[in-house]
Image (tube, rainbow, N blue to C red):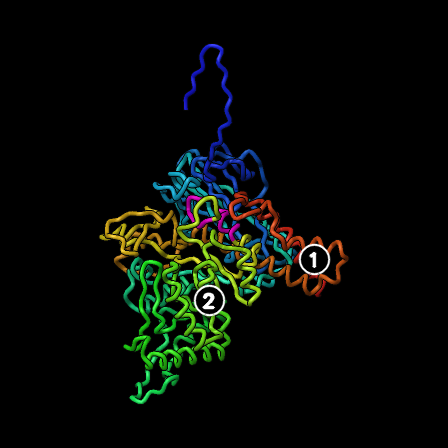
Amino acid sequence: MAIELTGDATFEADVSLYVPGLYASHYGEVLPESSDDVGLWWASSGWKVARERGLPDTRGGALTIRAARNEAEAAQLVLRPERDLQDVRLEVRDLKGPGRAKIKADAIDVLRVAYVPVTTPTDPTGAKGLWPDPLPPLRESVDVQGGVNQPFWVRVTVPTGVPAGVYRGEVRVRAEDYKATVPIEVEVYDFDLPDKMTCQTAFGFSTGNVWKYHGLTDETDKRAVLERYLDNFAAHHISPYDPAPLDPVRIDWPDVPADLKPGQVLKPNIDWTAWDRAMTRALDERHFNSFRLAIPGMGGGTFHSRREPKLNGYGEDTAAYGALFRGYVQEAQEHLRERGWLDEAFVYWFDEPNPRDYDFVMNGFGKLAEAGPDITRMLTEQVEAQLIGGPNLWCPISSNYQEEEAAQRRAGGERFWWYVCTVPKAPYATLFIDHPATELRVWLWQTWQREIDGILVWQSTYWTSGAAYPDQAQNPYEDPMGWVSGYSTDAGTRRPWGNGDGRFLYPPEAAAHVATEPVLDGPVDSIRWEMLRDGIEDYEYLAILRELLAQHGGQLDAQRQLQLNELLDVPAEITSSMTNFTVDPAVVEAQRHRVAAAVVELSQMRR
């Protein structure tokens, strides 16, 4: 912008400029062994560190983390050398705590923060440039370019059973002609997070993409890699839609008698053996808290198109269909009841209906409710008058959540999740790579604030689009955009959904171009995946505090009880509305620390 004034002219103006969060430079602390040759600094995991930004102005003593037992928390150690560094290695030793207590080195992961090139910003919040997102493991060493930042993700998973207190140790940085020692301090709160989270999660997981990119055809290899992906989901407290993709239910349908009577039920012979074994591991060992239950014969679809109900060759208008459908649903409901899995199961058979689909959707929910009234019926739609009586678990997109309507439905015993995908975009909290890291964490505080029970995202391994890349699969490290596919999109069409949409995990770097030989490594985390975990754990802090107040709040004086109850309210500094929230992780971390202190105080009352 150029303004030229001549003569006696005067000019005054107010101009608002938006600077993407990637270019924030007011955070972080320089570490003691930082030098003119190699800058060393650290930052919260909630910042996306730009490659080009300079060293912080503030000095600090140690990389600092706070966490409860059975919780994972991370911080970023950043190297900024003036010259190229070769063969950089980071090593963490055991951390020493109270008495002889230790957090062993194998509870600490060091990951490399990698950058992806955003060429098409998702929305005005984003910007072209290199954005940090993938977190590949630092197995050996890495070369670090001079003149730019290279963050490393230092993640500590605090074991159960260790005493509370501060644990201290060192991160040793070694390279050719360079070495440094970085102090690390981990404060362990005196309480444990449970294995199973209160906030339910449901995320899509495309094993087809995993098999394709990893180059897997052998079932043994598929199972080995699947285990690593499911372990990763579990470590982040995120439940995939289907945690048993290689162990489906086996169904033997009965013959339909010629003299079938109206209302008769024909029960199939169902072999649950393999599915039960896989689901037991999923729910009891990995502690997933939801799963999508498939119901044969429901039909389905989206706002774009639908599939009519059909079962074993019989259309919905036949008596045989009704008899077989009722038989299967009744058997499934009773099996889930016997296994104790009804609370985790949900039927998700139609996605984002248009008003023209409402009658079809209500018909499907009606027959499901009649045959299996205790099976949860979920719909990705906001409350609409025409849909009342159909779903009993509503899952609107976050920007379409209606508080008044939700309160009315809750009064009748119905529940709410919500979701994000290609929408909403700014100014809402979103899932995009080219947005502040805090958004997904803040989304979980908004979830708690609105008494929402769970979150859903349509996909986690959407690595390529058949429309945008019809001939060769997309490399998600080189192209971060989630391009539209399906919905009758022509091959060769490139229409953006948003950077990172549907992609929270990355294939191993060795499989980024689609492997020609089997790659048996597990997935690569992302910063956004880590932020989801942190937000889910924040939600759990609040759930624990609520439970402890219900148990022990009466033992407190009135003023202290009021103070602790106020901590259950999300402060405006974190989020005052769906579109007004902090992008500074320190604000969230400070409130989390206050909640943790309250949990510790109340926990001591029950000892």
Kind of residue at disc 2: Pro
**In the depicted view, which residue is nearer to us: 309 or 593?**
309
Image point 72% across, 62% down: which residue?
605
Res. 276 mark: none
Where residue 211 appears, as percent x and y from the top left, is 31, 62
Where residue 538 appears, as percent x and y from the top left, is 56, 55
In the figure, 243 relative to 83: above or below?
below
Magenta span: 430-443
The quadrant in which residue 189 appears is bottom right
Hey, which residue is sitting farthest bottom in the picture? Answer: 259
Where residue 599 appears, as percent x and y from the top left, is 65, 58
Q: Report helix, strand or loop for mark 1.
A: helix
Q: Is residue 442 magenta?
A: yes
The quadrant in which residue 600 appears is bottom right
Kind of residue at disc 1: Glu
The answer to whether any part of residue 520 appears in the image is yes
Hey, which residue is sitting farthest top in the picture? Answer: 7
**Quadrant in which the C terminus is drawn:** bottom right
Image point 53% across, 58% down: which residue?
405
Res. 391 mark: 2
In the figure, 486 relative to 242: above or below?
above
In the figure, 317 relative to 390: above or below?
below
Res. 601 mark: 1
Q: Report helix, strand or loop for mark 2.
A: loop
In the figure, 370 relative to 174: above or below?
below
The answer to whether any part of residue 157 appears in the image is no
**In the depicted view, which residue is nearer to us: 38 or 274?**
274
